[in-house]
Image (tube, rainbow, N blue to C red):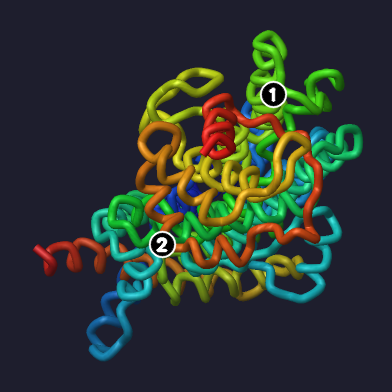
Amino acid sequence: MPHESSNASTHDQAAQLATESRETSGAQAPPINLDLLLKRCLGDIEFMDTLLSELESTGESRVAEIAKHVEETNCHETAEAAHALKGAAAVLGAESVHRLAANIEDLCRTGKLEGVSEMLVNLQAEMVRCLRFIPAHAHERR
Amino acid sequence: MNILIVDDDSLTRQMLAHTLKYAGFKVTAAKNGEEAFERFMIDRHQLIVSDWNMPQMTGIELCKAIRRAENRRYVYFILLTMLDRPEDAVKGLEAGADDYIRKPFDPSELIMRVNAGQRILNLETRGLTVFALARLAESRDTETGEHLERVRHYCSMLAQELRKNPLYQNVIDDTFTQMIYETSPLHDIGKVAIPDNILLKPGRLTGEEFEIMKTHTIRGAETIAAMREEFPNTHFLNMAHDIILSHHERFNGTGYPHGLAGYQIPLSARIMAVADVYDALTSVRVYKEAYTHDQSRDLIVKESGTHFDPDVVRAFLARETQFEKSAPRDEDANHDTVVLPPAILKLFQHIRVN
């Protein structure tokens, strides 16, 4: 199944990229702006955790959805999936994910897919960083 | 107010719902345009916050569908989108949306814009009410415009004064004061349903005639009740209904139409009772001269706890100088045919005798 192996491969690359990014850039901004998110949640930490849990459980599949459409070279669906992730990331204050998803959407809206794979790897890496950040943040609070 | 929110993204939907519930709104959530339209056709929401970019049916298509389906009353439609070019805003507003909020939204901005929408919807309701009143006033002019102006002014003063009383601080706010100012002129709209031979009779009414006259409270309230079916949960209409129905109730339970007593009588109606009677006392009627402020005040104080709520009477006394200044002067005299409750007529007679 080329589709699955391709996903697994890009996912591995992304995980490695995320790890490298963390190791080489200790001062890197957190992947989710929690202060902003908490403000948007009107100070309701429990509600904020609900949103983060949802991202934790759906983040990977949201990126996989984009990857699937990239593999199918379907510009329109790739743009739609990237748009959906862009909106969710913006709401959560996941600023890098938001920016990377927006770049993919913008590119695909022009009907082109050149360079989208590299963008996708970066997006996956950033999502990995988010998914690692959420439990760490929860642990820190406990 | 129940707000319909529409977004295909679960996180955004949850954030919208959380923000609007925090602001005190009820929320119905739909995850796409089709579901939203189905829910709208059942619940007929008056305010909708919808994402623009959704698969199958977009926010703009939803807006157009709702505009086509709803021609009886206005639906306030706010589009929520990440599109931020000015031409996008124009496109959304041209399609019939009323407002436009960028994602990610700031909660306070969302609440502010929804509140603005609610104010516009309320104005529409008020416009309809005033229109209904104007039609009634055209057909039966038994009260002069001056009487209505004075009464709303008295009600507003009494509400402001009562607000100083700790018992009412959580009940009376700026909105209450503004609403009683706006709704009090509607208190006698039901008189249009009273036959001319009773409504315009210069002398005292017989018992049978008075029974018919008493129905003006119920008939007027029925008019507002019909509007409330169209606009449920509209505070303006609720207060108008309370005033119209209950302003002839008496604190000791001997009033009409339902014989409510004490705090069973809505506060707005207890305030209205003092304002209306003070104006009737200080105005010339076909059956009496205008009473002085002092005479009128004494009558009202005498009826404190029987006809009137003692708290409202205390508020009246605290503001009596302003009441006196606002009372009709001789040159304002008119000959309204307002029929006062028998107890007040008895008091007039008592003053004549003494």
Q: Nearer the viewer, residue B321 or B229?
A: B321
Whether residue B66 can be seen here: no
Label 2 or label 1, whichever lies nearer to me, is 2
Q: Residue furthest front?
A: B354
Q: In this view, does B295 lie to the left or right of B227?
A: left
Q: Identify the residue at horizontal 64%, vertical 25% (top origin).
A: B217
Whether callout 2 and callout 1 share a subunit is answered yes
For label 1, count other residues whose C-alpha is less than 10 Å away and answer few (under 14), some (14-19) or many (20+): many
- Could you tell me which residue is drawn at 68 percent across and 68 percent down? B83
- The disc labelled 2 sits on which kind of residue? Ala
The secondary structure type at the circle numbered 1 is helix
Crowd rating for badge 2 (residues with CA inside 10 Å; few <14, some 14–19, many 20+): some
Q: Mark 1 points at which residue?
A: B216
Left or right, B79 with respect to B16, comes to right
Report x, y in % for residue A34. Answer: 31, 72
Query: Where is residue A108 drawn, in percent x and y?
Result: 68, 66
Which residue is depicted at the point 36% across and 31% down? B262
Determine which quarter of the picture holds residue B32.
top right
Q: Which chain carries label 1?
A: B
Q: Which of B308 and B329 is in front in this view?
A: B329
Observer able to see residue B89:
yes
Of pointers 2 and 1, the one earlier in the residue sequence: 1
Q: What residue type is labelled 1?
A: His
Which residue is label 2 attached to? Answer: B318
From what the image shows, is residue B24 above or below residue B34?
below
Image x and y of residue B344, in percent: 55, 32
Figure quadrant of residue A101: bottom right
- The chain letter under disc 2 is B
